[in-house]
């Protein structure tokens, strides 16, 4: 689980991120990025019903992405709000493929060192 200071929770902040954020997409995930005024980067993971109708399958993808982010948190550039959006093909991805895709999307957004 992500530490509390690295979670993006407020609905208005998430809406602003989706409206004004820059989008970068990779094989299994997409990333929306927007600069914030804090010392750390904050994350939200979005897995919509287009990925799968069943909540337990969406939650599995969400847990995997959060674990990947938590593992690589030290290498993420601070000061950004980040939304990680899962694509429908993320359901069939292995953990290694998902990790590769998340890190690749963060590199494309210039957030990963």
Image (tube, rainbow, N blue to C red):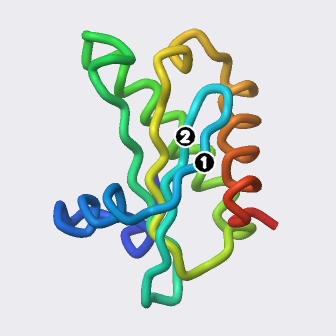
Front residue of 95/84: it is: 84
Q: Secondary structure at mark 1?
A: strand
Give the answer, above or below, for where 24 lies relative to 62.
below
Q: Residues within 10 Å of mark 2 (few under 14, many from 20)?
A: many
Q: Quote the CA–CA distance across marks 2 and 1.
A: 6 Å
Q: Earlier along the polypeptide chain: callout 2 or callout 1?
A: 1
Viewed as shown, does residue 104 lie left or right of 88?
right
Viewed as shown, does residue 106 lie left or right of 70?
right
- Point out residue 73 in the picture as x, y percentages from the top left corner: 64, 64
Give the answer, above or below, for where 8 lies relative to 24.
below
Viewed as shown, does residue 110 lie left or right of 50?
right
Q: Circle 1 sits on which residue?
A: 24
Q: Circle 2 sits on which residue?
A: 30
- Point out residue 19 in the picture as x, y percentages from the top left corner: 31, 59
> Furthest-left residue in view?
11
| Residue visible at 43% across and 35% down in the picture | 62
Q: Residues within 10 Å of mark 1 (few under 14, many from 20)?
A: some
Quadrant housing the C terminus: bottom right
| Residue visible at 17% across and 61% down in the picture | 11
Q: Secondary structure at mark 2?
A: strand
Q: Are marks 2 and 1 in contact (CB under 8 Å)?
A: yes
Place residue 94 in its image quadrant. top right
């Amino acid at each position: 689980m992500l530490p509390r200071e690295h979670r993006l929770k407020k609905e208005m902040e998430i809406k602003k991120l989706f409206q004004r954020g820059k989008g970068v997409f990779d094989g299994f995930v997409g990333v929306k990025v927007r600069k914030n005024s804090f010392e750390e980067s904050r994350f939200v993971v979005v897995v919509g019903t287009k990925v799968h109708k069943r909540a337990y399958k969406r939650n599995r993808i969400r847990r995997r992405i959060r674990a990947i982010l938590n593992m690589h948190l030290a290498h993420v550039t601070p000061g950004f709000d980040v939304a990680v959006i899962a694509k429908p093909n993320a359901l069939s991805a292995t953990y290694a493929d998902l990790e590769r895709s998340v890190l690749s999307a963060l590199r494309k957004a210039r957030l990963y060192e």
